[in-house]
Image (cartoon, rainbow, N blue to C red):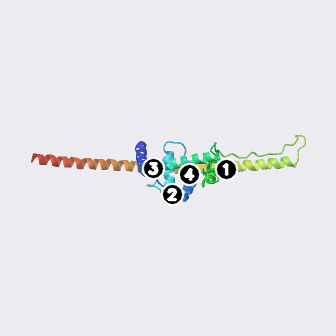
Amino acid sequence: MAAVTEAVETAVEDNYIFKWSKEQTTEFIKLRSDSEHLFTGAKNSATVGWRAILEKMGLQGKVTPLQAKKSWDNLKKKYKDFKYPGSSEGVSGKPTAATWPWFALMDEVLGQRPSTKPPVLIASIHEDTPGPSSAVGNQVLDEEEQEDEGQVEQRGAKRKKDRDGFLDLIREDMRLQREMEERRTQEAKDRMDRLFGLLEKLVEKKKD
């Protein structure tokens, strides 16, 4: 079923290329960043994720998930080229990070991956000379540990909610694909019935 869907999408893409406006490209990048939890690497998860993004943008029927993926891959490639330029940097007329309109937005999305937390620096003091700074340092660490525990709980609750939403999207996608297959099967059956009916009429005419 997935192969059939991909073949149909490829055929559509070969015959129609959607022209993205600047506003749509900006919204596309932001929605892709906000929908990172949908792209888990599981089978069909990317297709479900792209369909959810296209639905929010009102582009279903105009852009296929495959086209959306290719657009995102192109944006990532351009960002990396500008982020880490090679020997072609500085060529006259060639776009740069300063002139490419989506570099700053892509840098916000991709530039911080993987996200890292800056280390906490505590001034070292001699073990034999404890002072107020050690108590302050311990208090800061305790507060940070409490904050980290709260953040872990919040992230756990958010992941559960996102996972439930992701499962709902998969179920809905499977239901839609089943309905499409059923419609196609019924249409094929109707065509065959009409064909047999015509053949029967032709046979009867020849007998007459």
Q: Say few, some or many: other residues with alpha carbon within 10 Å of mark 3 (under 14 / 14 to 19 / 20 or more).
A: some
From the image, which quarter does the N terminus lie in? top left
Q: Are marks 2 and 1 in contact (CB under 8 Å)?
A: no
Q: Could you tell me how far apart the alpha carbons at marks 3 and 1 are, in whole angstroms? A: 32 Å
- Check disc 3 and give the amino acid type: Asp
Sequence-wise first label, 3 or 1: 1
Sequence-wise first label, 4 or 3: 4
Q: Are marks 2 and 3 in contact (CB under 8 Å)?
A: no
Q: Which residue is mark 4?
A: 32
Q: Position of residue 146 (x, y in %)?
A: 72, 49
Q: Say few, some or many: other residues with alpha carbon within 10 Å of mark 2 (under 14 / 14 to 19 / 20 or more).
A: few
Q: Nearer the viewer, mark 3 or mark 1?
A: 3
Q: Nearer the viewer, mark 2 or mark 1?
A: 2
Front residue of 46 and 108 = 108
Q: Position of residue 81 (x, y in %)?
A: 61, 45
Q: Nearer the viewer, mark 1 or mark 4?
A: 4
Q: Which residue is found at the position 75% from the left and 50% from the top?
A: 143
Q: Are marks 4 and 2 in contact (CB under 8 Å)?
A: no
